[in-house]
Image: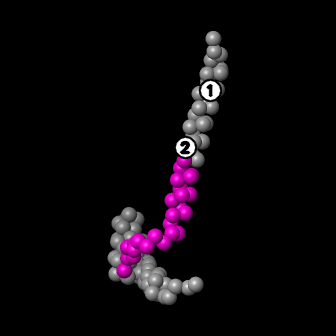
Amino acid sequence: MIDPHWRALEGSMWEAIVAGTATLAITGASLVYAQQGGRDDGVQRWRPSAEDLRAFGEARLAALKAGLSLTPEQARNWPAFEQAARDFSKLRIDRRIALRSAPPQQ
């Protein structure tokens, strides 16, 4: 007859083995996927244009404003925040476009 204490220990041992195996599989797959990101396989990937980036920024601002449910006092300050966010976004887009059009460094 098998001791009930042994069965409980055996069950938790299997749980640990399954959890460890799942962790290793997920970690291994993540590492393989991360290593593939740096390869240049000759495939041209989609690069958003400056207009695309501006549209995404406007959508983010609209979603942020809708999600915040601003109070009337906060809503009075929103235009200043919105302008600052647009200015920062323009700087970021300009820098990204400049880096994209710069000659590759060797």
Q: Quadrant of the N terminus?
A: top right
Choose top left, top right, bottom left or bottom right for residue 8.
top right
Residue placed most toward the observer, 104 or 5: 104
Q: Tell me the residue that label 1 is attached to.
A: 10
Choose top left, top right, bottom left or bottom right for residue 79.
bottom left
Question: What x and y, as percent, mark residue 94?
Answer: 44, 86
Q: CA distance from mark 1 to mark 2?
A: 18 Å
Q: Residue at x 41, y 81 (%)?
A: 86
Residue 33 drawn above or below residue 25: below
Magenta-highlighted residues: 25-49
Answer whether residue 71 is visible to the viewer in this image.
no
Disc number placed over residue 36 in the picture, else none: none
Amino acid of disc 1: Glu
Contact, mark 1 vs mark 2 (Cβ under 8 Å): no
Q: Residue at x 52, y 85 (%)?
A: 104
What colouring style does the render use? one colour
Q: Residue furthest top?
A: 1
Amino acid of disc 2: Ala
Q: Tell me the residue that label 2 is attached to.
A: 22
Q: Residue at x 55, y 63 (%)?
A: 35
Give left or right: position of 34 versus 75: right
Secondary structure type for disc 2: helix
Residue placed most toward the observer, 64 or 9: 9
Residue 37 drawn above or below residue 58: above
Give left or right: position of 32 versus 89: right
Q: How many marks?
A: 2
- The earlier-in-sequence mark between 1 and 2 is 1
Q: Quadrant of the C terminus?
A: bottom right
